[in-house]
Image (cartoon, rainbow, N blue to C red):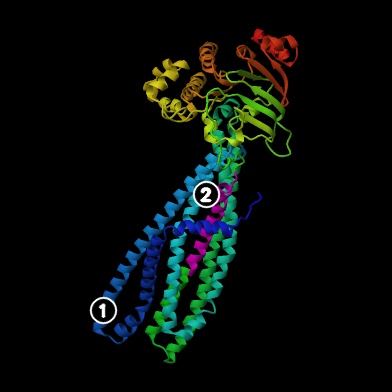
Amino acid sequence: MNIKNPKLSSDRQKKIISLVLVYWKRLALAALCMIVVAGANGAMAFLVKPVMDDIFISKNREMLLLIPGAAVLVFFLKGIGSYGSEYLMNHIGETIIRIFRNSLYEKITDLPIAFIHKEKTGVLMSRITNDVNIVKGMVSNAVINVFRDFFTVIAFLFVIFYRDWRLALGAFIVLPLAFYPIVLFGRRVRKFSTGSQETMADLNSFLHETFTGSKIIKIFNLEALEKKRFQEKTGALFRLEMKKITANALSSPIMEFLGGLGIAFIIWFGGMRVITGTSTPGTFFSFLTAVMMLYDPVKRLSRLNNTIQEGAAAAARIFDVLEEESSILERENPEILSGRALDVEFDHVGFAYHPGEAPALEDIHLKVAPGEVLALVGMSGGGKTSLVNLVPRLYDVTQGAVRIAGKNVKDLSLKSLRDHISIVTQEPILFNETVRDNIRYGRMAATDQEIEDAARAAFAHDFILSFPKGYDTVIGELGSRLSGGEKQRICIARALLKDAPILILDEATSALDSQAERLVQKALENLMKGRTTFVIAHRLSTIDYASRIILLKEGSIREQGTHDDLMALKGEYFKLQTLQSVKGNEE
């Protein structure tokens, strides 16, 4: 596996910092709480000298009363400061994570279909869930501990130099060595963390695909194969996680050893000063306590650096999505599409999904009059769906122009353009909501009566009423509780409710049985009256009513005309009709 080692660029760092600084008041209060915690830690080490010298050596009774009281006050202040800093920083962290999640979802929703098709669903889900959670650890927990430990180190340094500056200088010979593992292991953790995040995203994508395709897996008896593939992916994730754990686990013992060298030196050098009378036992033990407590936050900084490196890698992946540029751009002051009688023109249109690839459409010149029903036929891969996808700007042309009512679709606002277009796709797209909500998706302001009227027109009303809760029945993920025909009729009801002047039917009746197809076909014929309609069909028997038929092959228009005209040509359309008639007779 090729593991990248992404770095969070300065611009991206500034964006995160600017998000944090919006809450500067809470940040300042949290910093104040951390200073209180650091001061309390330093005070604990500071109190060791009067405990040793004044109580145990000098046996001062007044200090026996004062020092325990001071210790209680120190621990009380430390508790208040810890709670305040923890609450405030986590509030800031959770707020920023919510902003990241919302921004990611909004960005992914706004990006064109091409981006969604390019990325795996599980990978995009991992960005919003897994990666954002890792950033949360960096923004809240790590930042809390970094600031708290930084202030604590300052407090301990004050105690150390105040008690014995000569001994402090000796201790600092070893202390800088303790920071080396922070840098070394931090780099390795970031590298392996990036790999594990990418592997986790791939695992999410694999789970989404296998759960969605569980029926195929079972029918083809491929459970063993999918189990093996899953084990391979978890094995790769395990190896990366163990490398990260190894780097994390090694950093602490190495720092412990380096810290032990420093402590050994201090005991030897400080002990000599006490023996020679140049220092007191209280001063020495206060100094030693401060040094031992100083190494602890330095050691924690190593682990915190690893957390920050993981967060930086996750943040880089998040910004990769947030900074993705859309290929479907809107003019600064777009025109607003209006009216009901709308013609659609393809002016020498060429289209390719990716630069350098063979074009999916080539020199399409076609004008569809208002109210005309245009049928698109041809073998799979001929360019039928690609052509209709250009009308609502799900993709943009690479050559020529698509015009509606004489206006280039690129000059129109996306909202007004898509408000005038309704679609029923080959695969019914439904949501895990009620039947009523799924139909209302066509027009959110529709009344319950309008929803029922649309359902009746789509011949869905009767089977909806047969459900225990009628229109309030939740239909499951992707409409899993409905049959194929029922799902398609709800999608048709949704299109009927939208009542758009341009209609796209992409194999809209392919999932229906013969009886349901006849009923829905009548509803569609009524719906198509007065609307500019594109009908994609493989079953040619369903398009006899079309005003005109276009036969697409290899991205070009090969034949066009009425059914009778094309049959008389005895060309490609005639061959398709003959082939389907033979198959129909065999069945």
Which residue, given by chain and number where applicable, does mark 1 sit on?
66
Report if residue 315 lies within the magenta region: yes
Q: Residue at x 60, y 59 (%)?
A: 188
238 in relation to 449, above or below: below
In the rendered image, residue 560, in percent from the top left (x then y), is placed at: 70, 17
Which quadrant holds residue 222?
A: top right
17 in relation to 328, above or below: below
Which quadrant holds residue 568?
A: top right
* Element assignment for label 2: helix
For the question of whether residue 394 can be seen, the reply is no
In the rendered image, residue 235, in percent from the top left (x then y), is placed at: 59, 46
Which residue, given by chain and number where applicable, does mark 2 sit on?
131
Report if residue 549 lies within the magenta region: no
* Element assignment for label 1: helix
Q: Amino acid at mark 1?
A: Leu
Q: Name the residue nearer the viewer: 175 or 487.
A: 487
Q: Residue at x 67, y 35 (%)?
A: 353
Q: Residues within 10 Å of mark 1 (few under 14, many from 20)?
A: few
Which residue is situated farthest in the top direction here?
A: 585
Q: Name the residue nearer the viewer: 1 or 429.
A: 429
Q: Amino acid at mark 2?
A: Asp
The magenta segment is 298-325
Total marks in image: 2
